[in-house]
Image (spheres, rainbow, N blue to C red):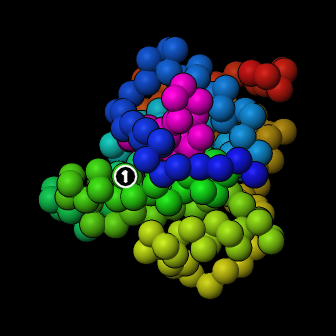
Amino acid sequence: MSTFREEALEVEFKSKLNLEERNYWDAFWQTCAHAHPRQHTIFGEIEKAKGRKVTYVSGAIGTELKCIGVFSSKPLFNGSRFSFEAYCLRGPAFDNPSVLKPFLKRVLEEFSASNTGSVRIAPYWESSEAERVLAELAQVGFQPCVPQRRCTETGRIDITRSEGELLASLSQKTRKHIRNTQNLGVEILPVTDLTQ
């Protein structure tokens, strides 16, 4: 394992990524062994379509990315304009647990300065490897919020049905999110090559 100095990690917060930054992020995401699909930049656009504030957070040493996280913010209480909750679904993505502590320290500093009262994360690590990650999280003050359980499935949908049948099977809120995403110019295409 490589040595790591906390002060060497530079953490950046951006509300949007230009094409070069997006390509840089996606290249790290593709090679990170502990990256979940929800940490791909496209999910930031989906969260924006839901009306949420999105922050792309990256940690780098020099020009090499070490950790990324798509954080979505929403009011902590319905109707609140002054207290927010930020969450990073299935992230942040990183391969060296040593970067987690300095990365999350900066995340907590930045979000608390913007009236965020709660930060939730869910790194994509399993089995014995997760023990070291849990130890790093505990040092920053994070605690598991539910009893630990293994969840490998987030839902299934039969995609052999027609587009109309698929949309009809979804909730009204989900259909609205899909329409909002389409209005933002997000194009959904079948994946024909795993490098896409």
Q: Mark 1 sits on what residue?
A: 106
Residue type at mark 1 is Arg
Which is more toward the observer, 180 or 132?
A: 132
Is 12 or 3 nearer to us in this picture?
3
Q: Is residue 118 above or below residue 63?
A: below
Q: Is residue 75 left or right of residue 104?
A: left
Where's residue 2, x and y in %?
Answer: 71, 47
Residue 77: x and y in percent read 25, 68
Residue 141 found in image quarter = bottom left
| Residue at horizontal 44 percent and vertical 17 percent from the top | 18
In this image, 160 relative to 5: left or right?
right
Q: Which image quadrant is residue 87 in?
A: bottom left
* Residue 70 located within the stretch drawn in magenta: yes
> To which quarter of the image does residue 152 belong?
bottom right
Between residues 6 and 149, which one lies in front from this camera angle?
Answer: 6
**Residue at the outermost left position:** 82
Residue bounds of the magenta highlight: 54-71
Instruction: Locate residue 137, reporting x and y percent.
Output: 53, 69
Residue 15 in the image, given as x and y percentages of width and height: 35, 33
Badge 1 marks a residue whose secondary structure is: helix
Residue at (83%, 26%) from the top-left corner? 194
Give the residue displayed 37% in from the left and 52% down from the top: 106
Q: Is residue 46 left or right of residue 38?
A: left
Q: Looking at the figure, which quarter contains the C terminus?
A: top right
